Amino acid sequence: MSSFPYTTLGDIDTIHSTLKASFLSGKMRNVSYRKEQLAKLAYLVKDNTKAICDALYADVNRNPTEVILSETSIILAEVANVYSNVSSWAKDINPPTGLNFRLMKLRIKPTPKGVVLIIAPFNFPLLLTFMPLIGALAAGCTVVLKISEALPNTSPLIQNLVEKYLDPHVVRVVQGGIMETSKLLQLRWDHILFTGSARVGHIVSAAAAKHNTPITLELGGKCPVIIDHNYPDFPLIARRLSWGRNLNSGQACTAPDFVLISRSRQDQLIKELKKAYEKFFPVENNLPRLISTDATKRIKGYLDGTEGEIVIGGKTDVEHRFISPTVVMDVNGTDTTMQEEIFGPVLSIIPVDSLDEAIDIINSRPQPLAIYVFSENEQFKEK
């Protein structure tokens, strides 16, 4: 049961109709008003950075510096960029045309879509809520924000700040779980933006299809790392993997998930990773917590069932939602750690005999969000 109130199903209908009427009134066609809302969003973040950091520390033990670097500073930079450019983006565009249409004086007129639903996840709750909101406001849309129910301090804070700083006829927050999200997906939207798992993405896609609603999906995946065995700086690789895999305790959809490396260089990589992990994580209790005990149990199950060798970390504490930064070597493609996106601080090392084998492993899996390549050889990188 939630420790903060959820939005009632009746209120969801009211919010939707209010924002639809507000959009049809034309108030967001005024670019100056869009800029006013963008500026207020910037002040929302700037004025309340400490409160945001405190809430995320209470919910998942995230360090304030990490929150500022990975969330609030990025949001402020994006608002500044969009604020400076939205006036030019909103102007009509005169496209090049063929002779048949030249006399018609064709133009492309950037036009707001309507009411947008943004469904944001728990892992970067400010960044993945406000970044799409910035785009929607700049485009002249009204917006419903469905934020994660898994953050009892951060989610109510976001709602309170949105209600304090932004026009309630332009942006509203809906709190809730499966029932409230299902209610939202029954309604007709002009665009839906969803960030989360592929499983839930299928549900969102199916709901959107009933109304022919366009959608933007940012789904998870297992992001591979390929290391050229001739790459000279293994300490650099180790530092970057240590940071990238363990930012927010690995709860990042673009985090490196597994490493493909020449069998002859695996031991060298492990040696450097041990040095980097010892330097990066001298006090494990300071690390962020996983979002839930269920998430912790799931990842613990991967480690309990792995056929690889745990060479770094491996400590688990389900009650306190903690898993230490962990590296597993000599992993194969059917290992428990390779079944789905880990979304936690576990890095799998798969030794391979050739670049072609590494590419085959990647191509045999669902398409990842990102691929990371360490090489100074242009032919290696191009292949």
Image (cartoon, rainbow, N blue to C red):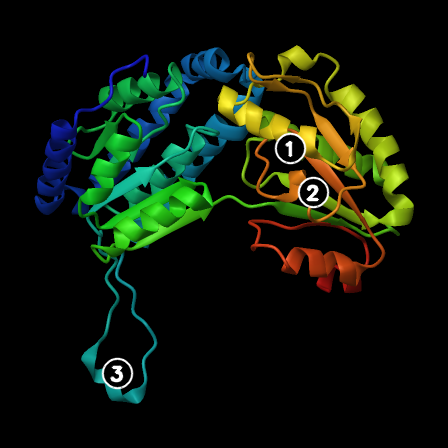
- In the rendered image, is residue 273 in sight? yes
Q: Position of residue 289 (x, y in %)?
A: 56, 18
Screen quadrant of the C terminus: bottom right
Q: Work out whether residue 141 can be spotted.
A: no
Say whether residue 344 is left or right of residue 111.
right
Q: Earlier in the sequence, mark 2 or mark 3?
A: 3
Q: CA distance from mark 1 to mark 3?
A: 62 Å
User: What amino acid is at disc 3?
Assistant: Arg
Q: CA distance from mark 2 to mark 3?
A: 61 Å
Residue 302, numbered label:
1
Nearest to N terminus: mark 1 or mark 3: 3
Q: Are marks 2 and 3 in contact (CB under 8 Å)?
A: no
Circle 2 sits on which residue? Answer: 335
Residue that label 3 marks: 102
Q: Secondary structure under badge 2?
A: loop
Q: Amino acid at mark 1?
A: Tyr
Q: Which mark is residue 199?
A: none
Would you say 383 lies left or right of 289 here? right
Residue at figure coordinates x 64%, y 29% from the top left: 345
Mark positioned earlier in the residue sequence (1 or 2): 1
On the image, which quarter does residue 153 sit in? top left
Residue at (54, 29) in percent of width and height:
70
Q: Is residue 361 above or below residue 298?
A: below
Asked if marks 1 and 3 touch (Cβ < 8 Å), the reply is: no
Relative image position of residue 239 (x, y in whole percent): 76, 32
Give percent across and percent down for residue 132.
37, 41
Answer above or below: position of 106 versus 54.
below
Look at label 2 and name its amino acid: Asp
Q: Nearer the viewer, mark 2 or mark 3?
A: 2
Q: Nearer the viewer, mark 1 or mark 3?
A: 1
